[in-house]
Structures are given as structure tokens and as C-alpha cells.
Image (cartoon, rainbow, N blue to C red):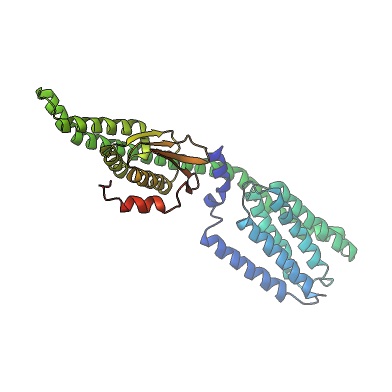
């Protein structure tokens, strides 16, 4: 469902309707319309109505570029379709009888131009309503002014031909555009998945390298049959805890958090880490923010137990850290990145920095 929504919202891109060239053509279109509307003023009754008709057509033409959604929603398509016959009505009733020249029916070609794009935007029915409305109004004006009903039909009927071409063009091109954008979206998602898999593999390789450098000397001593010293036994327990952190801690563990957990355990703190998956789909900045809060909590702890849990995805609370010694201190990181705790926002960091013990 997400892919289809993305494709529909970006069909304009494959058609080039949001490029600088499209805006340039729109500007040239506006200049041409204004020039014709204001220059062909011979015998015009009230030029203000003609100018307003030009504004209506230019606004409808602009909506073909800026209006979102595909197919174009009715709330945009209907006003655009109505603008053509309305502008025709405003302008044609200001014309002299007979007309001074053919340029004075500029509004027919101008309306037809953007109605063709209304077809391409996925609203062909409303485009046809607009052009047929123009024909009816032109026929009504010529009939009312004694020129004959077919006169108005004759000089406005010609606009049906480009609209018919635009309708067939849209039926062929739009499905192809959807297919191209769907393939592009699939390529983007595939590249993102491959990048995530590569990053995860690199992180696993780094963890294996860290554990190898820490565990190999101890394993070689055990394999030799020599009795481990008390310090080596303590180191074995730390390495075992680090291996457990890598398995259960998931993405909340990085080099700095791992080192902070080691120093905390050396101070007699029991550290329990549990990743429920809530960090898997958040931004890198938010993930690092959670790691920073966890590292500060580990540096702050002087004894007892530190239990850090990443909650499952979709929760309002992203991470929960409980420090339990003589008293309890709970720290929570919300999905927005806000940190809530029994301490003020900077006290935890300040006390951790002032602690003279080794820090991670």
C-alpha cells in the first residue's frame, strides 16, 4: 500500500510536470495569454471582464502543476474544469458583433491547452465537461447575437481534436508512468535493504573482532591447561557478560556503550541489557541519542543493578533504564527523543563527568 501511494503522488515527476522546463513553459503560456487578451481589444465592451477571464485560465493552468495527487482529486479537477466555460462566458459577451479578428477568441485555445493537461493528470471526464461547456456557451452567444447557432459550434468545435488526442495519450502513458515509478520505488527499497544488511554485517564483524581480541588470550590459556589467576577469572566473567550483551543488547550496543558496561561491571554493577526491537526502524540520530543516555546511566551507576530495555516498535516510550541500588532511578526515552527521569535533564551527565572513576 505504501509503494502505490508513493507512486501515485509522483507521477508528475515522470511526466516532467515539476521540472524547471515546465515552469518556463507555464511562464511563456501566461505571457502569451495576457498579450492576446489585452492586445485584441478592438470593440471590447469592458476589458476588466476579459482580464478576469485570463486570470481564471492562468490559475487553472497553474493548478495542473501544483495540485497534488494522482489521479487529480475532484476538489482540484472540478474548479479547473469549470474555469474554462466560466472564462469563456466572461470574455465572449464582451466581444463586438461581428468580431474584429480571430485573436479575440483567445480563451478557447487557452482553455483547451490546460484542459489537455487535465486529461493527463487523470481527470479526462472533467476535461471533456470543460470543453463541451465552452462549445455550449459559444453556441449560445452566436445564437443570441443573430450569428447563428452553428457559427459558435464551428469555431469552438475544433478544440475537441487536441482533447481527443490528449485522452488517448493519457490512457497509454499514465499506466507506463505508474509501472516505471513502481520499478524505481522497488529499486530504492532494495538498495536501502542491501545497505541496511551491509551495515548490520559490518557491525557484527566489528563485534566478532572485539570479542576475538578479548577472548582469544583467555581461551589459549584455558587450552594450555594452566590454572587461571583471580584476575583472569574476573576477565572471563567480563568477556562472558560482553558476549551476552552482544546477543541480547542488539543495536543499543556500540563500542562506547560496551566499554561503559565493562567499567560499570568492574565497579560491581550488575548490568542487564535487553533489546526489544524498538531501535530497528528509528533514525540513526535517535538511536545514538538512546545510546548516549544509556552510556551516561552506566557511568553514573556506582553499584546495584542497571537494567536497560528497548521496548517493541510502536510504543510511545522507546527505552527504559532502571538504576537500582539503595534507591531506584528510572530513566525513559520517548519515541520523540525526550528524556524523562527523576533527575533533571543535565544532572545525570554532570555527575557522571565529575565521577573520578574510569569512564567508557
**Quarter of the rendering containing residue 114:** bottom right
Q: Residue furthest front?
A: 326
Q: Is residue 322 above or below residue 13?
A: above
Quadrant of image for the N terminus: top right
Q: Going 30% across and 50% down the picture, which residue do you hit?
A: 355
Q: Going 62% across and 52% down the picture, which residue do you hit?
A: 68
Q: Going 62% across and 43% down the picture, which residue do you hit?
A: 171
Closer to the camera in the image, 357 or 13: 357
Question: For this view, does 79 lie left or right of residue 203?
Answer: right
**Quarter of the rendering containing residue 175:** top right
Question: For this view, does 281 lie left or right of residue 244?
Answer: right
Q: Going 59% across and 67% down the picture, which residue do you hit?
A: 27
The total number of labels drawn is: 0
Q: Is residue 310 above or below residue 78?
A: above
Q: Position of residue 311 (x, y in %)?
A: 46, 36
**Whether residue 43 is visible:** yes
Closer to the camera in the image, 298 or 31: 298
Q: Position of residue 100 (x, y in %)?
A: 78, 74
Q: Position of residue 139 (x, y in %)?
A: 84, 59
**Whether residue 106 is visible:** no
Q: Position of residue 157 (x, y in %)?
A: 76, 56
Closer to the camera in the image, 210 or 76: 210
Amino acid at each position: 500500500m505504501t509503494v502505490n501511494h508513493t507512486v501515485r503522488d509522483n507521477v508528475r515527476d515522470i511526466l516532467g510536470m515539476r521540472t524547471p522546463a515546465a515552469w518556463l513553459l507555464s511562464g511563456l503560456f501566461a505571457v502569451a495569454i495576457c498579450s492576446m487578451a489585452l492586445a485584441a481589444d478592438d470593440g471590447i465592451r469592458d476589458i476588466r471582464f476579459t482580464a478576469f477571464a485570463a486570470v481564471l485560465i492562468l490559475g487553472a493552468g497553474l493548478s495542473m502543476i501544483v495540485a497534488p495527487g494522482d489521479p487529480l482529486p475532484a476538489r482540484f479537477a472540478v474548479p479547473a474544469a469549470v474555469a474554462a466555460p466560466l472564462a469563456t462566458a466572461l470574455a465572449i459577451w464582451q466581444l463586438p458583433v461581428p468580431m474584429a479578428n480571430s485573436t479575440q477568441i483567445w480563451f478557447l485555445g487557452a482553455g483547451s491547452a490546460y484542459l489537455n493537461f487535465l486529461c493527463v493528470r487523470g481527470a479526462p471526464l472533467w476535461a471533456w465537461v470543460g470543453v463541451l461547456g465552452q462549445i455550449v456557451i459559444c453556441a449560445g452567444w452566436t445564437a443570441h447575437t443573430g450569428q447563428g447557432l452553428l457559427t459558435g459550434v464551428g469555431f469552438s468545435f475544433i478544440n475537441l481534436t487536441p482533447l481527443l488526442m490528449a485522452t488517448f495519450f493519457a490512457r497509454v502513458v499514465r499506466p507506463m508512468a505508474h509501472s516505471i515509478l513502481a520499478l524505481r520505488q522497488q529499486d530504492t527499497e532494495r538498495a536501502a535493504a542491501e545497505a541496511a544488511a551491509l551495515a548490520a554485517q559490518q557491525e557484527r564483524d566489528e563485534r566478532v573482532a572485539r570479542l576475538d581480541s578479548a577472548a582469544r588470550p583467555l581461551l589459549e590459556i584455558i587450552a594450555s591447561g594452566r590454572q587461571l589467576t583471580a584476575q583472569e577469572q574476573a576477565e572471563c566473567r567480563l568477556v562472558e557478560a560482553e558476549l551476552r550483551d552482544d546477543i541480547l543488547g542488539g543495536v543499543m550496543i556500540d563500542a562506547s556503550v560496551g566499554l561503559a558496561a565493562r567499567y560499570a561491571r568492574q565497579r560491581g554493577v550488575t548490568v542487564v541489557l535487553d533489546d526489544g526491537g524498538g531501535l530497528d526502524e528509528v533514525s540513526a540520530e535517535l538511536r545514538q541519542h538512546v545510546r548516549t543516555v544509556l552510556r551516561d546511566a552506566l557511568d553514573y551507576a556506582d553499584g546495584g543493578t542497571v537494567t536497560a530495555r528497548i521496548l517493541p516498535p510502536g510504543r510511545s516510550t522507546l527505552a527504559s533504564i532502571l538504576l537500582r541500588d539503595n534507591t531506584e532511578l528510572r530513566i525513559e526515552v520517548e519515541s520523540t527523543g525526550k528524556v524523562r527521569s527523576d533527575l533533571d535533564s543535565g544532572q545525570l551527565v554532570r555527575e557522571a563527568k565529575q565521577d573520578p572513576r574510569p569512564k567508557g
